Image (cartoon, coloured by chain):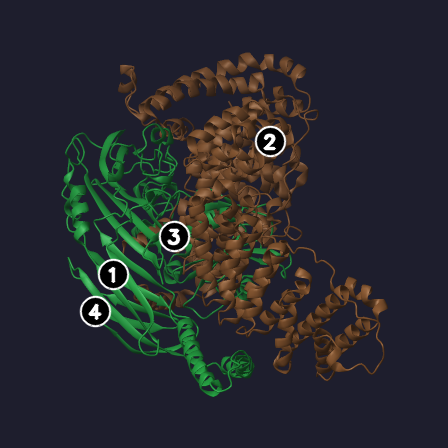
Chain colours: A brown, B green
Amino acid sequence: MESLSRISSILETARDLTLEAAQAASASGRTIRKDGKQGTSAETKKLLNSRMDKEVLDGLRMVIGMMSRGVDCSEFFADVVKNVASPTLEIKKLVYIYLLRYAESEPDLALLSINTIQKALNDQNQLVRAMAIRVMSGIRVPVISQIVALGIKRCVADMSAYVRKSAALAIPKCYRLDPTTLPQLTEYLGTLLGDRSFYVVGAAVMAHLEVCPDKWGLVHPHYRSLVKMLIDMDEWGQLALLRLLTEYSRKHFPARRTKKKVKNRDAGGVEDFYSDEEVGGNARGKEVEVATVMDPDLELLLKACVPLTQSRNSAVIVAVARVYRHLAPPDCLPTVAGPLVSLLRAAVDVQHMALVNIVSIALEHPQPFTQFATHFLVHASDPAHIWRLKLEVLTLIFPHTNIHTKNLILSELEYFAKGYDKELVKEAVRAIGRCAQSQTKNAARCLRLLLRQVESSDGTLVAESLTVIRHIIQQDPQNHAKTVVRLAKALDTATNPSARASIVWLVGEFAGINDGNNVAADTLRILAKGFHSESEQAKLQIVLLAAKVYAHHLNCAPPAVPTGENQDDEDKHPISLLFSYILLLARYDLSYDLRDRARLYKSILSVPSSTQLATLLLLAPKPTPQAPSPSSGRESFTLGSAAMVIGKDEDICGYEALPEWTTPSRAPSPSLREPPPSAASGADTHRGGSTTSMSAVVRGAGVRSASPRIGSPHMGSPRAGSPALPPTARANGVPESLEEFLASEEEEEESDEDGDDDDEEEEESEEEESEEEESEEDEEGESAGLLGTK
Amino acid sequence: MSAVEALYVFDNFSPATTPILQHEWRSRPATTAASLYSLYKAQPSPRPSLIYLPTTSPPTLLFNIIHNNLLLLSPTTSEIEPLLISEFLHRVIDVLEDYLGSPLLGSKIEANYDIVAQLLNEMCDDGFPFTTEPNALRDVVLPPSLMGKLLGSVTGLPSASIPSSFTPTPTKTLSAIPWRRSNVRHTNNELYVDLIELITATIAPSGRFLSARSNGTIAFNCKLSGIPDLLMTLQTPTSHKQKLGAPPSGGLGFPVFHPCVRLSRWRERPGELSFVPPDGKFVLASYEIDLLPSGNPKSATQPQLPVSVELKTAIGPQWSEFEARVFISTAFLATTANTLSASPFGPRSSRSPAFGGSSNNPTVEEVRITFPLPPAVKTLTGTRCSRGEFHHEGRKVTWKIPTTSAFSGTATFRTGVVIKSYGGDDNEVEEEEPVDNGEYQDVQTTKTAKANGGNEGEKAKREKQAKRKMEMAMPRCALVAFSVKGWLASGVKVDSLKVVGGKGLGEGVKPYKGVKYLTKAGDIEVRC
């Protein structure tokens, strides 16, 4: 989605940025002068120590300003921290910001403020409580780790979702402060993962990834509820959760039994499937079929991801693509292909990342992208890193597209091959080569296209085309004899040294076909005349050509045993004459290399006994060169990772490849994912109650479940105790507005809660023991934690 | 593990290499802002948004985006989803613009460090994005105007005496809806919708469209009290019968939505957007529409655009000129726009004057043609245009055509090109000639015509070469930009916009509703 700032800049046209900047600059000049006057530290300290809020605020603003500019403000520590007890929220906030930055350098003084902050944990205002826990955990003074852990414990049980969310994010901070608190922290984490507010769960997942990503036991019982909450979370929570679940799925669901399925699909016809214009309907049909093999829990995740492809956040879309790429069978990829392509309408930085991801999928599965070919046309305004990737996508999808699109792609590449940007020309010609390679059917067409370029006056273009032509010819030498003749003709006009060298080499390679009845000898004759004016590169190839032609000549018509030294030159075959002429020219050349080579060829071809050796040396069949797609190798990285964008993983700290699929024998029993009876059923009746009623409404009104209805009960501020609903609505029995509806539900829930929890606590301990082995401890701890909250 | 570690903002206007703003979310990074900046500058431009710096210790992933004159750098030292940071940085810019006013300038940041620090602190906690919704932030951080009031109001009283009424919304209550702040109150209830479409297209030399797409965005400015529940219905004229978003590609392609939109409603009835809007400005949705009706460009009827360009290169006696003719026609715009505004607005017929009013006479504005020039071009001579003015700078010529209302007609631009004489290139040409001569003489074995034929052949060859050389110095495409108010290329329109529920909006209050359409083309590439 376009960012708001870009849209508003489009809307507010004729906005002269420089003018406004200049005005602002002159204005800011004044303010700076004003600031400068106040800037002395004595003044600032005086303000900070003032008894008037306004002056203290002024002082704090100055300190924060200096901090933001990068000036060291540690000298004000005492004066700032003194204000930590101020009842004014604005002052408090700024003091907290200061503390976060400088507490580390003055641990002793910072400790003095801890008491006040701890008190703030009991404040009536949820914002103050949240801020307090954030600051407390953010002060990097190891001594207080226990206090922080206690603070987290208290906040985990807080009524306000906002506070609980802050507490969740405080967990990693506390862990870094003192790793020995881990057992307590995981306990809190378990509670938070089971929280009923999606607002909190997102943060809890982030903390889990940070603190103990390997403790899967914490995740098992919440797996299904997490998947259900996915759609309602904020974008950042979705990102974290998708990352967690991708890894979870790899580790806990056995690999699909693919073989059987592939057969099924072949019968159905993969081609038909992909050539369809619309992906939606068909893909869904397919999914069902696949689902028979897939773990139902995994399927749940895949289904829950689909609505996320309409997220405004490009990172979420890519994360969904990652789930589909690494967890779903390849024929589900069309679900994410379109949304990925649609990212190309965003800002350039998003475009770049989207293209990297598209390329890495297309390397293995190009079909889903074929229908979007026109999205990858290069625009004149694209920077290099964008058009490189676009050209690559075009070549990757080329073999799988219909004839129109093929024409489109080839003419597109031809257009850019004639451009003036040398890099773009090179890349376009190489792309044509890759198109030819990927499908021999099209090679002839690509070749025609390239041959047209050979006569161009642009050296870069010619050289690059020839290299590519050489590759194409080498793949199928039998059918390209005529092409070589045509190339030989091009020697008349081609001027670029490496182009000439390339042509000469190719002619030499084909010197052997049709029993010597070819252009090689004639080409050599013509080249011999201009030998002196050739570049060294070309000369080397001419000498080589001479040697090859001569070797062929020797092979098919071995000279009669030389009768004597006095044999006349006229009697000799023209080829041997030519050969010795070239050798003569080369012998007096300036280049050592050339002279050496000439000597080598001369000696090796002079004696009949070594002719065979020479043949082996000169006429050995060459292996077909392969030009892989520039990004090949990227497909092995996890989709959407920075490592994939960079293209190498060794240096990127923290990058880990996704684990392999687990084997069926090692996969844990699905019963692990059954919600633990007590804790979760407490939460479940709770949640279930609300979800059923909610989903009824959701479906009835067609509400995305993130509608205010769901948000409210957990996010209101219970302590403030301002239920914003008129009681009249409930009297009617029919809730009319969102809030009323909500409110009614909230109360019901509240009453449910206690009873349910108590009842089921006992059941839990027994049932759990039988079913769950690994995560028993965690869950018990957790359920206890959860109960504690209520 | 993965976290947003720090943010540095540099002002391109100020020569200093120190950031105007630095904010670190975790302990201080090993690499300083200044050295990151110099490493960034060392990369060749244009720079990708993610730069890998292996030389720093530890190696750094440097994310960067440029906004107006500000450069935002955000380093991380460990694996992270690149788009997470990109999106976060864009979100930071949006929020700062929201608070400090657009355009965002360095001086505005400098004047409001306290606000910016609070915002950054709230948007990201310990490297994890925390509260990024502008409305939710409003509940937590006071905007500058209120802050000023707060400061101004406290006069000479001892501490703890700021009247509670002056801590405005802050904060006793947090909104129940993450994207809408609580207790919204407006004296005038207004609702503005802007549908903006950006056309990108590529036109082949033959005049055929290779691709044509319209990327639409629905921007909202909502000033409604309470918690209103809105329903907006969109319609595309090409598919009156057929519902939006339904296959085949007549509807909105790949829409993405603000979290407030109820997705299930859209799924059931595509074209209907049901949502509780955030307060203030926001982007509701964006979509794309393929203007080439069927995927097959050959058979398709060509999309109509109000501006078309014909480009002829390598003309004139020396093949050294090129000419562009621009045709501007607004006739069909008016007809399509009329059909648009003719249909009744909403069943309630609560049609406000803003509807349709502006879309009656769409005019083409800001027509601008840009020719990117090859590096071989030294300068331009004899440039003339029949309308407007041109501006040659660096490697492009921009030609601006002023349009008055309802202007249509043609305009011509013609210029000569002077090419650079490369020392190297010329030499190469000289060198190559002896070789060619030799071969020519060889080929033309007739002895008598040798001299003449050689000369003529050479002349023709020279001419050919000169022509080729000129061709290499010709622009290969023209980039067309224009904007049309009151018309959308795709024909999408707002069918109705209603307040269907919610609370807080008093009975009988009919909010003022306004819809604007704007089409912009910035990247129509006409090739030749």
Where does label 4 land, which residue?
Answer: B387
Relative image position of residue A141 (x, y in whole percent): 61, 47
> Disc 4 residue type?
Arg
Q: Residues within 10 Å of mark 3 (few under 14, many from 20)?
A: many
> Disc 3 residue type?
Leu
The residue located at (23%, 36%) in the rendering is B497
Could you tell me which quadrant the N terminus of chain A lies in?
A: top left
The one nearer the camera, B325 or A706, is B325
Q: Chain of mark 1?
A: B
- Label 2 and label 1: CA atoms lie apart by 53 Å
Asked if badges 2 and 4 are on one and the same chain, I answer no
Asked if badges 1 and 4 are on one and the same chain, I answer yes
Where does label 2 land, which residue?
Answer: A249
- Label 3 and label 4: CA atoms lie apart by 41 Å
Where does label 3 land, which residue?
Answer: B96
The one nearer the camera, B399 or A600, is A600
